[in-house]
Image (cartoon, rainbow, N blue to C red):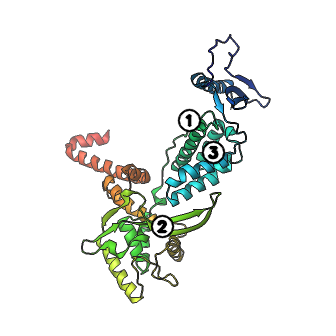
Amino acid sequence: MPQQLKRTHSKAGRRGNNEGSIHQRKDGKWCGQVTTGYKTDGKPVRKTVYGKTRNEVASEIAKLTAYVFSNGYTTISSRDGTNFEVLCKEWFGLFIAPGLSSNTEEHRRAMMKNHIFAEFGALDIKNVDLMRLQRFFTSKAKAGLSADYIGKMKNLLNNFFQYALKQHYVITNPMEDVVIHKRVIVTNTNDRALRPEIREDVIAWVMENPILKPIVFVFTLTGLRPQELIAIKWENINFDSKTISVKKAANRTFEFDSDGNVISKSLVIGKTKTPKSVRTLRMPDAAVNALLEWIQYCEQNDIKSDFVFPSTTPPTKGEMRTYTGLRSLIERFREKHGLQSEKITLYTFRHTFATILLEQRENPKIVSELMGHTKVSTTLDLYGTVFDTVYEQTAQTLDGAFTDLCPKEKSAKLAIV
């Protein structure tokens, strides 16, 4: 049973018992302390907070004091010197990693190593406080990290500190008061999709390449993800109904050592990114014809495989094409045609698919379904800038239609005004 505190009334100009203390250091910063619990050996546990002003520290002291009054003193295990990185790795390995895909686990471990541990790894967990965390997230936002990536880091750290709080490594969860300032991020769609100015030239050059043509046509006319395209087999193609069925995806799997470092990786056929990604798409005639041409090319060059787009060169000829192989094919194409300044990646043609549909004013809900997005909001967020042009065109259309409804005399007066 935690020891309960007696409420006291402080005299003017003086803090009451158990209400902590505040003072200004020689460097000008303010700091304060509150006794929040006791260790198993009877020694007090004091929480120190820092701020630029006395009021800032007093506000944090008030929160801690209110917590103690509500919950009593907490008994903290005698585990001084608990290293943040060691505890976080242990928590992640036991509670989080088993529920993640291998690819997501690798991303999260890289996030922790490159950002979180680089900042807090050497510290005692009790020293990772609100001020340190707020400065960390503010700096990451200024460095240009995406809001989505920062949000994932915040969620990861919040879950970790919730665990640390329950296990009495800390007395509060400092992540509860971290503020992530939402910035309006304007995504330049041209950085994702082929720019309208070069689309015709790129497609013309692609048509000269018998290996790249069917790949780019299927990418651009169906919106498949790279991992979906790699995993497509001939059994997934129905030429009678002109459809392509997405049922599997090529996923990277990783093996980690005890420190969370990647020691090996491989590519295997597995589940799609989300259940929504399992879908059957109607292929335009241009994609169907490109595949029929591809069949002839494979027969002429003795390329036999269950995969639609396998490796075409020894010693892996006929085997599933890898990310590296597909990426190299795109890179060689860029260099040959002087497109080094263009951001053409494995996802460029998928983004071009969505961009063209939205430019043609296709229903975003339909585009979302075709892309395999779980939510239509994902489509709207990714391709928001496309709507700027669409909205402008819509406004002009509406203006023209409304003008036609007005008598010519009134229209002239309106134009003058």
> Which image quarter is the C terminus in?
top left
> Which image quarter is the N terminus in?
top right
Image point (63%, 19%), residue name: 5
| Residue at the extreme right of the image, as rendered | 26
Q: Circle 1 is placed at which residue position?
A: 176
**Looking at the image, is mark 3 or mark 1 nearer the viewer?**
1
Give x and y (percent) for residue 286: 32, 73
Q: Which label sits on residue 139?
A: 3
Q: Is residue 72 visible?
A: yes
Image point (67%, 36%), residue name: 77
Q: Circle 2 is placed at which residue position?
A: 346
Give the spatial CA distance, label 2 vs label 3. 30 Å
Q: Is residue 372 visible?
A: no
- Three-letter residue code for mark 3: Ser
- Three-letter residue code for mark 1: Glu
Image point (33%, 71%), residue name: 236
Looking at the image, is mark 2 or mark 3 earlier in the sequence? 3
- Three-letter residue code for mark 2: Leu
Left of 230 or right of it: where is 181? right
Q: Which label sits on residue 27?
A: none
